[in-house]
Image: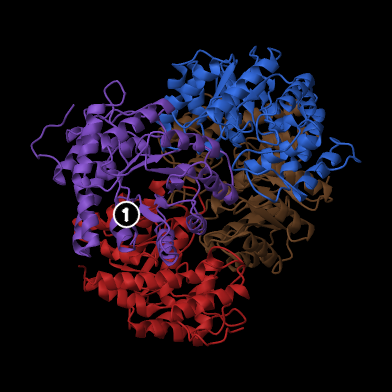
Chain colours: A purple, B red, C brown, D blue
Amino acid sequence: MSESPFRGVIPPVVIPLTAKKSLDLDAFHRSVNRMIDAGVDGLFFLGSSGEVAFLTDAQRYHVLQEAVAVVNGRVPVMAGIIDMETMRVVDQAKRAASFGVDALVATAPFYALGGPKEVERHFRAIREYTDLPLFAYDLPCCVHTKLAPEMLMRLGKDGVIQGVKDSSGDDVNFRWLVIENEEAGHPMQLLTGHEVVVDGALLGGADGSVPGLANVDPYSYVEMWKASQAGDWNRVRELQDHLAKLMFVTRGVRATVGFGAGVGAFKTALWQMGVFNTNEMREPVQRLVGEDVENIVAVLKKQGMMDPDAPVRQ
Amino acid sequence: MSESPFRGVIPPVVIPLTAKKSLDLDAFHRSVNRMIDAGVDGLFFLGSSGEVAFLTDAQRYHVLQEAVAVVNGRVPVMAGIIDMETMRVVDQAKRAASFGVDALVATAPFYALGGPKEVERHFRAIREYTDLPLFAYDLPCCVHTKLAPEMLMRLGKDGVIQGVKDSSGDDVNFRWLVIENEEAGHPMQLLTGHEVVVDGALLGGADGSVPGLANVDPYSYVEMWKASQAGDWNRVRELQDHLAKLMFVTRGVRATVGFGAGVGAFKTALWQMGVFNTNEMREPVQRLVGEDVENIVAVLKKQGMMDPDAPVRQ
Amino acid sequence: MSESPFRGVIPPVVIPLTAKKSLDLDAFHRSVNRMIDAGVDGLFFLGSSGEVAFLTDAQRYHVLQEAVAVVNGRVPVMAGIIDMETMRVVDQAKRAASFGVDALVATAPFYALGGPKEVERHFRAIREYTDLPLFAYDLPCCVHTKLAPEMLMRLGKDGVIQGVKDSSGDDVNFRWLVIENEEAGHPMQLLTGHEVVVDGALLGGADGSVPGLANVDPYSYVEMWKASQAGDWNRVRELQDHLAKLMFVTRGVRATVGFGAGVGAFKTALWQMGVFNTNEMREPVQRLVGEDVENIVAVLKKQGMMDPDAPVRQ
Amino acid sequence: MSESPFRGVIPPVVIPLTAKKSLDLDAFHRSVNRMIDAGVDGLFFLGSSGEVAFLTDAQRYHVLQEAVAVVNGRVPVMAGIIDMETMRVVDQAKRAASFGVDALVATAPFYALGGPKEVERHFRAIREYTDLPLFAYDLPCCVHTKLAPEMLMRLGKDGVIQGVKDSSGDDVNFRWLVIENEEAGHPMQLLTGHEVVVDGALLGGADGSVPGLANVDPYSYVEMWKASQAGDWNRVRELQDHLAKLMFVTRGVRATVGFGAGVGAFKTALWQMGVFNTNEMREPVQRLVGEDVENIVAVLKKQGMMDPDAPVRQ
């Protein structure tokens, strides 16, 4: 098994806002500390769950500055450098690096249409501008390109990328990537982003997970990771079943779809649990209200994440 | 755990052809008997791997007639009733039933554009015309509709369908379906069609698998199922790793994509292993030749499925 | 300009049903005769609008038999031979030919995944089994494959296909196809299926149209075609504007989407106008009712297709 | 017809680079002046063709500064404010406005998943931060959301947007939008981005076009616009036929697909015609070379855009 520090449980950090939609430092510190105290192995800022698409550059760097300060070296910090095409991403990389993060995470280029040649050149060009560990973020739902395992293996063997965050939902290709990475001497850390089926990914040999739901329940993800390392697969399954049921917070949302339902539900859960002070969202997304909030509270109570008698926050 | 006979390993049967592209009964019997002798729990005819899209109706019923005869009650027989819209499917259902099959498998309607109302009505209408167990085949890559778990649960609870063959690649929704099916008293048998990640599905509670690759290596799938029932997850993982590597027969194909590469590789493997007499395909698909065949043989030898010194069949 | 009979206005015939969902011969004759009397240049049976996906084989051949009888040589009859893969389509071709139709219309293969090699081979294989004129039906919304203009030109030059019915919505490639077809000596008849923008297609050199909406208003399509032949483009535009507004019958539908909204609206319009006796649809689609019907009547009245004082049929 | 200045021919300006991939001011001035001298009605900077996805913010504002200076009020200047989600777009809007542009062009939000509520709120939120005319850019190929005509009409009537640049390829919905816009008193300028079928759009009532190909041949687009205003549709068709054939510069490209083939071909054509000094592209896209260049030159010569005896630039 690899000596890389980028393994285990590395939550993509959800960002709390004040009622006026600015960064809520009080809740931010509370949530980050809660995850570190629970034993997570790293933290990923400015990912999709971390509102990277919604933040101006100034807001992005505010998050990174506060993140590095509050984490203070306790765990490695990964930073998303998400932008449309290569030189914009390089621009983000240079600025993120200046805040002292430990690794960078980049998607395939998006917006302009391209083909596989451009995708591979994109990662190689980024590498020419940074010495930090670089993770490829496989996220076809957002960037509309699936990263081919063959290309990832080439990039890994050539030292262009040091790992993959796989949120593609393509478990077959992920399994093949794990196998080929192992046969090549493990040049990459392979992390799954699918919080509901982490157990299968770990059984199949993944190096860890990047579960958005770990903002809500970091304890169970940490325990699941430890159980998997100990080979206690029945316990892994039990914990995953609990977490899959906890993920129902996102399923009952009626007001909207996508980010507003998913991260909107996480924020609402953290608000109801007292970790966040609000469930505010950034434009153009609106915060969840009414029945959507009540349904989330019902799931939290059923899964033991809230006192059964606690009232619903308004 | 359910008492249903539709559990464990139920391969979708790949169809051998003679050099003149007619059903090769000799090879068909050999392959079916080989899988039954290996201990499979059922067989699924006229699925996607079983060339259902390529067969005229007369050819479909020829397959079913021979299938029921050769299986001869040793394991349950499932039959695909794949067609464009409801009454064409009902037509297929009536005729399939007349051959004495044990269960029917239907996809969402395809070709004409519709919405969720039409999909649900489709399955309910089929149920009005048959008493046989009915499985919903979730196959968005072919029919361009994902079956919603909420709808499947309604159909399961109402006795419309008795199970799901999930080839959607959406493991998150499959996991949720498993959880909700369990909470509802297990009205459905939930089978995964993803041969490369069966281990994770079994850890998550699937009732079995429908792996096309089991035509090539039924033994390992049967052993994996038994190991999972015994809770020996390390053995499950070892077998799945072998099978994931064996699936590389489909990955190196250069001549074409899709069915011609996937089922084309299975046929070529079975031909090279001496189970099939040819690797012929039906129009408009062409059989694999040359380097594609050599690459498949190399994978088979690496995974111990062929004598390392055996020559490549021409 | 070509001497081919397959030019001008060739409506895809919508099928009237009785209240018990069987073919309504009375209304069928009335509607077909109405279109021929209006001056259409041909009729296309068993297209998407003609319920081909929903009809059992027996029902399909019932339609063809009645169609050939009622048309009785007054205009050419085209017949859809829509099925999943090559030999099933060939089966449909042989049977359709036996009813005396004048041309066949086939889509790319669907359901099984394939690539461009299989698509081209598909049309060439069909040609080996029939001497009738063959039209390629470009319908990516239903078959999920766009027919490449380069391939269509090869098939046209080789005498494999005699025309294209383009319902792809890709007007850029249609324009290029028109240009290349002209440069090659016009081997193919190029017909557009997009009833709302026929004017632009005719200005660009299309040989005709296959507009579903011509079931509702054949007169305006015939007049538009004649105006385009006379170079009276302002009149062409006026007629197209009327027809684009008439197409709003499909836009206000709330109960469902796709075929049920589109052909459902055409049937409802024909029913309200007294051409059809019902607006029944085939399983799993349900007929439009209530407000959807009222909205359609409002459009018909606004566009002068119904007496403003006529009551809404129930 | 509207009094708005945003009508007629408004090319999206393609950006020339030096051999070192920096903005080539010499060629930039030459190309912009050439289009203005040809009689275009406006210019659109920082669109998809204008490399907006590939430019860092500093590079974007360099382009705008030079654009406003060289245009110097001769025609209106539109500026793309393309970014991922609302507040990033607002940031771009504020900065673009500071350079003195005359109108802003924004797409639907992209990257984060959302629904129709978020899309509508996005445009309304942008309006709260700017007084400039705002155009909605309908570009589903890049942002994976189609702008619904009903929503566009609401935004137009409410004064949120002043026009639409339609590059959706959905001519049916564009036609309906034209009709409804007219019925509402023409609150929006409706421009088509499909350079190959501008004739049909103009016949149908579009207010103008935004054709990338007008960088190569602005004269024909200007003449086509004038002919359409004069009702000379046969001349319109002739010019469009020429332009459709000229667009074949993009069709023969073998080295890549998408932006690199499309804008890559435009740059190569402008280079060969002596307007640009190179055909350099920005990372990760590579410039066209070899046979691709020769094919483009052949098209240019065939369409009379280059001296038949001119050598191919290397």
Q: Identify the residue shown where x is 69% and y is 26%.
A: D11
Q: Which residue is drawn at 65% across and 48% down?
A: D256
Asked which quadrant contains residue D17, the reply is: top right
Residue furthest out toward the left: A309
Q: Which of D177 and A227 is in front in this view?
A: A227
Mark 1 surroundings within 10 Å by alpha-carbon count, few (fewer than 14), some (14 through 19), many (20 or more): many
Q: Mark 1 points at which residue?
A: A208
Specify the quadrant of the image occupied by residue A54.
top left
Visible residue check, residue A293: no
Task: State the residue in front, D272 or C21.
Answer: D272
Whether residue D125 is visible: yes
Tell me the amino acid under the disc marked 1. Gly
Please state the horizontal and vertical placement of residue A275, each as a whole percent of the image: 19, 34
Q: Which percent across, then down, holds residue B256?
A: 60, 65
Q: In this view, does D17 lie to the left or right of D159?
A: right
Q: Residue C102 at what x, y percent from top left?
A: 72, 58
Q: Please give left or right for residue C261 compared with residue C119 in the image.
A: left
Q: In which quarter of the image is the N terminus of chain B?
A: bottom left
Task: Answer above or below: position of C86 versus A118.
Answer: below
- Label 1, secondary structure: give it: strand
